[in-house]
Image (cartoon, helix red, strand yellow):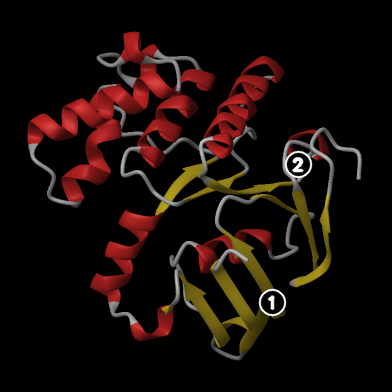
Amino acid sequence: MRRPLLVLDHIDKRYSSGELSVLALSDVSLTVTRGEYIAVMGASGSGKSTLMNILGCLDLPTKGRYELAGTDVRQLDDTDLAAVRNRLIGFVFQSFNLVPRTNAQRNVELPLVYAGVKARERADRARAALATVGLADRAHHRPSELSGGQQQRVAVARAIVTNPAIVLADEPTGNLDSHSTAEMLDIFDELHAGGRTIILITHEPEVASRASRIVRMSDGRIVSDELQTVGGAV
């Protein structure tokens, strides 16, 4: 059996402000092995984005244990957490999060800048990542000169430029039309076929149908976790 890449063990996440306390995740356990393609589904407020923040080491659980590649994340300080995020995880968000005044190549290079990679290697790796998502000819275009679908492909190139084991995508098709959505999902299929672990947060059944496993959430809990035939036939 393959060793688990991510293990959540009875995780709670509680947010408190003054006397107000909200339990966003309750007794969540989840194991992900390397190379899986998982869709996490749920309505707004179900806890799926909080789960992504925990998985991506953007937040820490209030209770329970989270192991990432065999390491308990609670043992890591902020610097180590940032290094782990940059090395193991690539993020894709609904809103693209590109730097407006910087061209596509420079946007893709940013994680490598933080990792201390030299300029020539950064440029080479950024161009290769853009080629992977079909945008080699748009390297010097700014976000305002790209369509929404192209901007999201730049965001995917930025997510994979560090060669992470995991791509975490939070509603990555939420701002895209149907054609761009299909293109984006084809890219995720290709990344998965290349061995990447994909965790996709979505509320859209047609998007989740590309995954081989669907985790459904409600009220901060996992209510089902099922394998499916790719294409949507469960």
**Element under label 2?**
helix
**Where residue 6 appears, x then y in whole percent?**
55, 68
Q: Earlier in the sequence, mark 1 or mark 2?
A: 1
Q: Position of residue 186 (x, y in %)?
A: 62, 25
Q: Confirm whether residue 141 shows in the render.
A: yes
Q: Determine the residue positioned at 71% across, 19% down.
A: 178
- Residue sitting at x 30%, y 64%: 82
> Mark 2 belongs to which amino acid?
Ala
> In this rendering, would 141 be left or right of 116?
right
- Classify mark 2: residues with Cα within 10 Å, few (<14), some (14-19) or many (20+): many
Q: Which residue is mark 2?
A: 208
Which residue position is annotated with label 1?
A: 29
Q: Is residue 109 left or right of residue 64?
A: left
Residue at left offset 73%, top offset 36%: 210
Disc 1 residue type (three-letter)? Ser
Estimate the x, y position of residue 140 in percent, counting from the top left.
25, 14
